[in-house]
Image: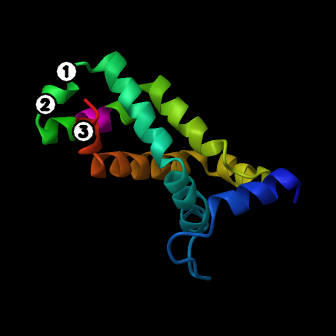
Amino acid sequence: MNQRDVFIKEFRGPAIGIVTAQSSTEESFQNEVLRPVLKLQNDLFVASFLNYISKNKADFYTHTVEKKMAIIENAIQKDIKFRNALKGMIIGLFTADEYCLYIKNSSSLNKRMMSMLTERLKSQVQLFDVIT
């Protein structure tokens, strides 16, 4: 393992969630890699979404909470450019070995990543009102 990989693993911190011998490869990857990265990058995701709404959804603040949740979901699911930027923020904190594992299962892992990120932003929707 090279210096970058050692640094990345130490920087991200320990796994979040239970990983057992019965855990699937994807579940282990989610708890050992994705959850720590999402937690570490949370402030960046919030800042990125604030930038997204300032450029694309100026009326965001006038909507109900339910509509804001839908906007968050649509932004991540339908805006490919924004989605790819978010994926880059996550993938950039993978080790080389984790990246190799990721590319073998990228379709299902992308679904997990984006679903977890969507739920993370939706659970913090109140932050997007405070900053107006």
Q: Which region is colored magenta?
A: 70-74
Residue for point 62% across, 69% down: 14
Q: x, y percentage for residue 61?
A: 18, 28
Distance between mark 3 and mark 1 Cα atoms: 15 Å
Q: x, y percentage for residue 72?
A: 30, 36
Give the structural element (helix, strand or loop) at label 2.
loop
Q: Nearer the viewer, residue 93 or 132?
A: 132
Residue 59 is labelled as 1
Residue bearing mark 2: 63
Give the structural element (helix, strand or loop) at label 1.
loop
Amino acid found under the numbered disc labelled 1:
Asp
Residue bearing mark 3: 130
Count neighbours of disc 3 (C-alpha within 10 A) and say few if under 14, some if 14 to 19, many if 20 or more.
few
Q: Nearer the viewer, residue 122 or 74?
A: 122
**Is residue 9 covered in magenta?**
no
**Farthest bottom residue in view:** 21
Marks 3 and 1 close (CB-CB < 8 Å) = no
Marks 3 and 2 close (CB-CB < 8 Å) = no
Distance between mark 2 and mark 1 Cα atoms: 7 Å
- The chief SS type of the magenta part is helix
Residue 31 drawn above or below residue 94:
below
